[in-house]
């Protein structure tokens, strides 16, 4: 590896952050096609980073910490983390020949606009800074090499990193119950910290124990699960961005932050629900209590989106548990969610 052939891209954040940065990463690749492109991201996301066709190597990184870079100074370093200056310092310490950041004291670059969609923001940084077009719809990931734990499932993802973005568990359960009554193979997903929440939703929906996949899937298995899904229902989380990356039908529930800033692209198979006030500004995405805008989304709205013309998932086949037996477990699923 030589200093004239390396580009380092900084994006050590969460799953949704990584996936919204994919179009910009692809544009960087187009700008320096002969470089080796190294993506600095969190260790947990390294397997997913390998599914981005523009990335050659992954460098484990932690937010705003110095990079463990052992090579010579890169020819190009790009800050896809934030508006600076703290993240700008991380890439500046690499002593790159060229550096691309948003403008902040001591760092020239394009202007940061707080009301810009996350995908378009980073595309604009690269387009203005490197002089190449950047397609905001270039969000797709390569398919994982691992098999999906379940195929053709309706995935309900009740978790979120903060309570402000977490729709109530009983409402997710009502949606799951509706999907099961329609004949869908419903699975409740989540990370290791969301196992109890997923179990609560599954129990309230009358689903069997094997419907809970939370805490059982690796990062790549989760990606494979979404890639093979019938539909994804989730809040404004990384799960929603995986549905976008694999073009799977999705219903995404927004609360403190508007879909105008973090929502899916304008495709027919993605439905974004939001009842915020565009004039009031964003709520607190790190809030400890349910955001009022998210609370205003009803079960009926989510069900209507699932049954509506954009997704049309109602198969009207028998639920898988009735096909297996006529147990009392299924009979508890039979009522339509109110």
Image (spheres, helix red, strand yellow):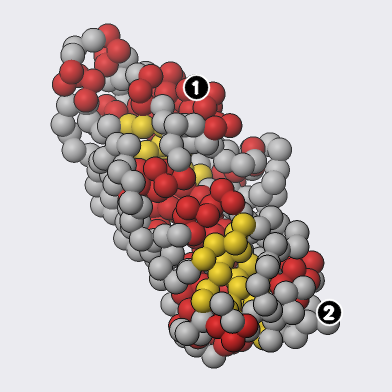
| Nearest to N terminus: mark 2 or mark 1 | 2
Tell me: 95 left or right of 124.
right
Tell me the residue at 39%/43% (across/down).
221
* Residue 178, image x, y percentages: 33, 30
Q: Are there few (<14), some (14-19), or many (20+) residues within 10 Å of tag 1?
A: some
In what quadrant of the picture does the N terminus appear?
Answer: bottom right
Rendering coords of residue 183 (x, y %): 22, 30
In the rendered image, residue 185, in percent from the top left (x then y), is placed at 27, 32
Q: Is residue 59 visible?
A: yes
Q: Which residue is mark 2?
A: 105
Residue 337 occupies quadrant? top left
The one of 154 and 338 positioned closer to us in this rendering: 154
Q: Secondary structure at mark 1?
A: helix
Pair 2/1: label in front? 2
Question: Does residue 239 appear to the left or right of 182 in the view shown?
Answer: right
Quadrant of the drawing holding the C terminus: top left
Query: Can the viewer see residue 120 in this picture?
Result: no
Identity of the residue drawn at 24% across and 47% down? 312
Q: Is residue 44 shown above or below 201?
A: below
Taking depth in this image into account, of 209 and 55 the one nearest to the observer is 55
Q: Residue furthest top?
A: 328
Residue 307 is left or right of residue 279, and the answer is left
The circle drawn on residue 200 is 1
Up/down of 269 relative to 1, above or below: above
Locate residue 106: give its quadrant: bottom right
At 47% from the left and 55% from the top, the residue drawn is 48
Give the CA separation, mark 2 to mark 1.
Answer: 49 Å
């Amino acid at each position: 590896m030589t200093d004239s052939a390396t580009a380092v891209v900084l994006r050590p954040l969460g799953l949704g952050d990584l996936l919204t940065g994919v179009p910009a990463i692809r544009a960087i690749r187009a700008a320096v096609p002969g470089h080796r492109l190294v993506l600095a991201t969190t260790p947990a996301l390294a397997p997913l980073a390998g599914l981005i066709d523009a990335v050659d190597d992954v460098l484990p990184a932690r937010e705003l910490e110095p990079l463990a870079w052992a090579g010579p100074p890169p020819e190009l370093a790009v800050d896809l983390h934030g508006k600076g200056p703290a993240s700008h310092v991380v890439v500046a310490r690499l002593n790159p020949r060229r550096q691309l950041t948003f403008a902040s004291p001591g760092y020239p670059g394009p202007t940061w606009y707080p009301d810009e969609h996350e995908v378009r923001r980073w595309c604009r940084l690269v387009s203005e800074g490197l002089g190449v077009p950047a397609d905001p719809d270039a969000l797709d990931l390569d398919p994982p090499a691992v098999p999906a734990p379940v195929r053709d499932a309706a995935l309900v993802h009740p978790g979120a990193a903060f309570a402000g973005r977490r729709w109530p568990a009983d409402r997710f359960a009502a949606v799951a119950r509706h999907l099961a009554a329609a004949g869908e193979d419903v699975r409740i997903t989540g990370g290791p910290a969301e196992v109890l929440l997923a179990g609560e939703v599954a129990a309230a929906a009358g689903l069997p124990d094997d419907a809970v996949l939370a805490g059982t899937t690796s990062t790549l298995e989760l990606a494979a699960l979404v890639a093979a899904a019938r539909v994804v229902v989730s809040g404004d989380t990384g799960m929603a961005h995986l549905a976008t990356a694999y073009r799977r039908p999705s219903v995404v529930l927004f609360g403190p932050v508007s879909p105008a800033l973090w929502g899916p692209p304008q495709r027919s198979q993605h439905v974004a629900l939001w009842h915020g006030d565009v004039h009031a500004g964003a709520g607190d995405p790190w809030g400890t209590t349910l955001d009022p805008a998210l609370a205003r989304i009803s079960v009926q709205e989510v069900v209507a989106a699932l049954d509506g013309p954009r997704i049309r998932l109602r198969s009207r086949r028998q639920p898988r548990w009735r096909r297996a037996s006529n147990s009392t477990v299924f009979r508890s699923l039979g009522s339509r969610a109110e």
